[in-house]
Amino acid sequence: MNAQSTKKIAVIGAGSWGTALSISLAKNGVSVRLWGRNKDLMQHMQAERENTRYLPACPLPSQIHCFHDLAEATDGVDDWLLVVPSSAFSDTLEQLQSLHPDKTPRISWASKGLDPVSQRFLDETVKRYFPKSPLAVLSGPSFAIEVAQSCPTAVVVAGTESSWVQDLIALFHADRFRVYENTDMIGVELCAALKNVLAIAAGISDGMQLGSNARAALLTRGMVEMRRLAAYFGAKPETLMGLAGLGDLMLTAMDDRSRNRRFGLALGRGQSVEEARGGIDQVVEGMVACRIVHDIMQAQSLSLPITEQVYAICYESRSPAEALNFLMNREPGKEASSS
């Protein structure tokens, strides 16, 4: 029997990513309590052993138990993994805190974005509700379907307490799911948010058929914007060049399974923001992150021209062609400078 068979964890969020991570944990012998808001879906998943809505054709191992009652899903479980959209992150934690006001769970999350309520990193949101809990974030280049199918994948975990990070690594690490420790939680969270903004930009460029040169330049200069934000928040530069940064950016910006890239593709092909969002039919995290980063950029006078143009397209009705003209006709500058 797997050494992890005595372990149990509540996975909060039954979308494609939450389901995939649950499958990965269950294959490692971990007992998983998977919670989702949709009662009918969770009952169907429990009976049919498949998430036909978000992750079809990926059977659920017997170690996964599905719940639509959040109190029942988390009762007696000290380890929680949140995998809800950033827009629902604060509300979910508020519910959990009201259900367990005296509990100090070990909390991790695989959500990628920023809190739209506080406009801050997700670890700060968790601390508001569970100030004494050990925290950890899991991130990296990882499409849900490939994780569920046991395709080789590598991610990072960063946290506030080494023991919790090491326990998470032990729960997840497998022959097809490699987990590295990272000591830069802010850097990991920052990369997870901004890479979605840059994926929208890459999608817009490719939707306009601007070519491979344009995409390469856009993503390279996007890394510069990521570096500027990292410097402002005190993140480690090496995190940007690792799995959470460059790795996840390559995946999200260059593969059409990325919803942020697909959203950008639709915009670049002439669809309106509303039409593009409707075609995705899931949360476009990069659009939420773009608004928050834009506010930070303005407040701190940071130079983030790509982010600025993605914001203008998403929120100010600027056309992709106008955004392109703005970026290409800026004053020439030194590559390593702040311009």
Image (cartoon, helix red, strand yellow):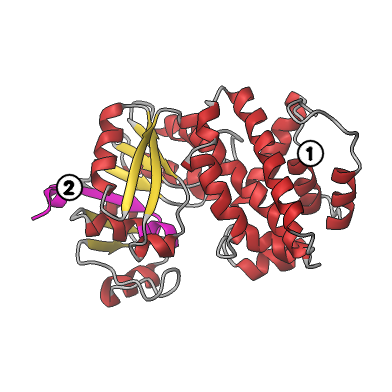
Nearer the N terminus, badge 1 or badge 2?
2
Image check: 202 left or right of 185? right
Q: Quadrant of the N terminus?
A: bottom left
Q: Which mark is residue 305?
A: 1
**In the rendered image, the vertical position of residue 194 relative to residue 315, given as above or below:** above
Q: Is residue 12 magenta?
A: yes
Residue under label 2, please give it. 7
Circle 1: residue type: Pro
Are the residues at dot 1 and dot 2 in contact (C-beta closer than 8 Å)? no
Where are the magenta residues, as a range? 1-20
Look at the numbered disc 2 and give the secondary structure of its residue: loop
- In the picture as drawn, the residue positioned furthest to the front comes out as 213
Of labels 1 and 2, the one closer to you: 1
- Numbered marks: total: 2
| Residue 204: x %, y % from top left | 74, 58
Residue located 66% across and 68% down the image: 278
Residue located 80% across and 52% down the image: 313
Q: Quadrant of residue 221?
A: top right
| Residue 10: x %, y % from top left | 29, 50
Look at the numbered disc 1 and give the secondary structure of its residue: helix
Q: Is residue 103 visible?
A: no
Separation of disc 1 and disc 2 at Cα? Answer: 47 Å
Front residue of 180/299: it is 180
Q: Is residue 173 magenta?
A: no
Badge 2: how crowded within 10 Å, few (<14), some, or many (20+)? Answer: some
Front residue of 39/16: it is 16
Circle 2: residue type: Lys
**In the rendered image, the vertical position of residue 63 relative to residue 78, given as above or below:** below
Image check: 124 left or right of 40? right
Front residue of 36/334: it is 334
Residue located 52% across and 32% down the image: 187
